[in-house]
Amino acid sequence: MKKITVLLATIFVLSSSVFAQVTEEQKETKKLEVMGGLCAGYMYNTYITVGAVADAFVSEQYDKARSIELMKEQIGMIGSIVKMMQDMLDMKALKAQSDIDYTKEVIVVLKGLSQQAQYVIDFAEKKTDDASAKYDKQRLSNWSKISKLLGLDDEE
């Protein structure tokens, strides 16, 4: 019985180590999956944040100064992320064309979200119909692109 237990334990240890070995390609794939997931969450949450601040300003829950401050923070963070992603493209860190294309699409969306945040600032400062219309047009464009990238229904 003791020999069977030792044999089973040895087989278990050996089989575990065989399955535990991960190739460099698998590691790279996992990194790209994580990056894609982070990008998806960031785009979605930024879209929600910009919209929530705009709604809070219109409903007078946030004043002009607070709304502008929050949107400037969003614009700054987006700019940093866009720069990092563009640097990654410039150094040719991505191998697959699909990864390159996805990254380029994310950059387009992030720049659109930055523009949407700027339109919140413009509306907070001017409160014109033109500023409101630009914000709404950008919001709809951003959602269309985000929902396409994330595979969501094209509903608001």
Image (cartoon, helix red, strand yellow):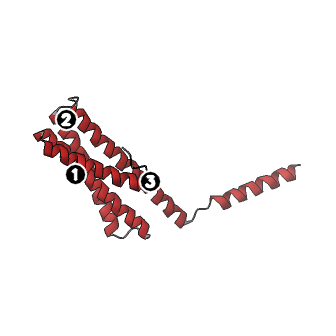
| Residue found at x 25% / y 46% | 74
Could you say where residue 15 lies in the image, as x and y percent from the top left?
71, 58
The residue under label 3 is 151
Q: Is residue 147 above or below residue 27?
A: above
Helix, strand or loop at label 2? It is: helix
Could you say where residue 113 lies in the image, as x and y percent from the top left?
27, 50
Viewer-nearest of labels 3 and 1?
3
Q: Is residue 87 above or below residue 131?
A: below
Sequence-wise, which precedes: disc 3 or disc 1? 1
Tell me if label 1 and label 2 are in contact, CB under 8 Å.
no
The residue under label 1 is 115
Disc 2 crowd rating (10 Å Cα; few below 14, some 14-19, many 20+) is some
Q: Nearer the viewer, residue 143 or 39?
A: 143
Tag 3: amino acid: Gly
Viewer-nearest of labels 1 and 2?
1
Q: Nearer the viewer, residue 139 or 48?
A: 139
Could you say where residue 118 lies in the image, as x and y percent from the top left?
19, 47
Sequence-wise, which precedes: disc 1 or disc 2? 2
The residue under label 2 is 66
Could you say where residue 47 lies in the image, as x and y percent from the top left?
32, 45
Sequence-wise, which precedes: disc 3 or disc 2? 2
Left or right: where does residue 65 sit relative to residue 106?
left
Tag 2: amino acid: Arg
